[in-house]
Image (spheres, grey):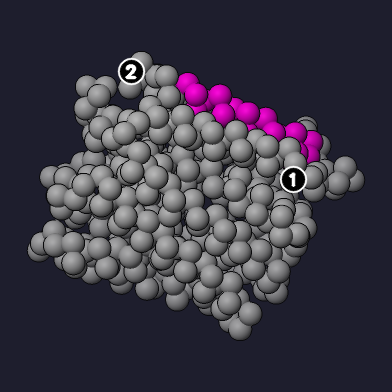
Amino acid sequence: MTVPLLMGLALLSASAPFATDLYLPALPHIAEDLSSTPASVQLTLSGFMAGMAVGQLIIGPISDAVGRRLLLLAGAVVALVSSVMAAMAPGIGVLIGARLLQGVGAGACIVISRAVIPDLERGKKAAKAFALMMTIQGVAPVLAPVVGGLLAEPIGWRGLFWVLSAINAVQLVVALLLVPETKPKEERSSLRGLGQNYLFVLRNKAYCGFAVTFAFTFGAMFCYISASPFVVQEGMGFSATAFSVVFAVNALGLIGGNYLNSRLIDVMDTARILGIALIIMLVASVLLTGAAMISTSPWVILPLLFVAVSQCALIMGNATALGTGEVRERAGSGSAVMGFLQFGVAALVSPLMGLGSEGAVTMGAGMVISTLIALGAFGWARRHHVSLE
């Protein structure tokens, strides 16, 4: 695992942060421009997440059979074409459809980027590689909302999708130049046995527990991602630019968490780090929900949100490493199931965040429920996990 390859994988796996965070500050403007409702506009997020979920579920196991590189290039091309379609969308229906297709392309980039690491590394080395990749990848959610907030008014939401198209073009070049084939022919499965690949990973109880932990931790984070533009801008009265700064600060918390995780892995058991972070996230989410019921003061809610969101960095990378490590022989299928659950959960929670009159309370409650499910799944995984370190 070389540094240039790790940086290339980080950029490719940043498809989701770029495709979601860049246009988040413009969500209220899209609703106004296309004469739509907040719930309908949030379906552009759900459509993207659904595409990511289905795309990964299909592409992951196929990459175990035919190799990684060709499918990675195809996914990068689809992501680029669909970004152009979104920029030119005449109505909310076309925009949702373009986002669905964009999710499929981005899903290919993400699932294969995650599968490359267990192709090359295992145990603590794999966990550290995932942590470092996510640290590098963390630049995307810091820059994307800031750029989106600054450009939302001058170039509009369509202009933001043209910026995303340019980013997708860079990702395609990176895939062409930096990412080699990492799945040797002698280690590939048969296309006829794709169903067996899924049975192989789903029969592993520890893997299933870590996969659900990973997915519902992301679900908690997506409660924040989908609800925060309306909570911060409409509920707290912040501008689009101020919202982008708030979002960037939380993204810096994710980068800090990933860096801390990469250091802790050297001195602590990976599963122990994961468990402690889950408990901290649950406590912060409960306090956040309670505070939102009393007041929408940003001085109370935003610090608690920062603490809760930062824990995702210590949970998701370790859950990915532990889960894919359990099924290393079918890492593409394992990564695909994790991705399907991850973005499937995100697609479900996004429209739910548009319900209720108190957005901050709805967001906090969603985070609490998601974290509780993740914590329960982690307990299940620990009972069946055999250390690979």
Task: Give the prevailing secondary structure in the magenta stretch.
Answer: helix
Q: Residue furthest right?
A: 186
Q: Position of residue 315 (x, y in %)?
A: 49, 65
Q: For this rendering, which residue is in front, 25 or 288?
A: 25
Q: Position of residue 221 (x, y in %)?
A: 38, 55
The residue carrying mark 1 is: 179
Q: Residue furthest bottom?
A: 267
Rendered residue at 21%/41% (across/down)? 355
Q: Is residue 103 left or right of residue 329?
A: left
> Which of pointers 2 and 1 lies earlier in the amino acid sequence?
2
Q: Position of residue 147 (x, y in %)?
A: 39, 45
What range is drawn magenta here? 61-85
Three-letter code for the amino acid on which mark 1 is drawn: Val
The residue carrying mark 2 is: 91
Rendered residue at 43%/47% (across/down)? 144
In magenta segment, residue 156: no
Q: Is residue 10 left or right of residue 102?
A: right
Distance CA(mark 2)–CA(mark 1): 37 Å
Three-letter code for the amino acid on which mark 2 is drawn: Gly
> Can residue 61 be seen at all in this image of the molecule?
no
Q: Does dot 2 land on a helix, a strand or a loop?
A: loop
Picture quarter with the C terminus? bottom right
Q: Residue furthest top?
A: 90
In magenta segment, residue 67: yes
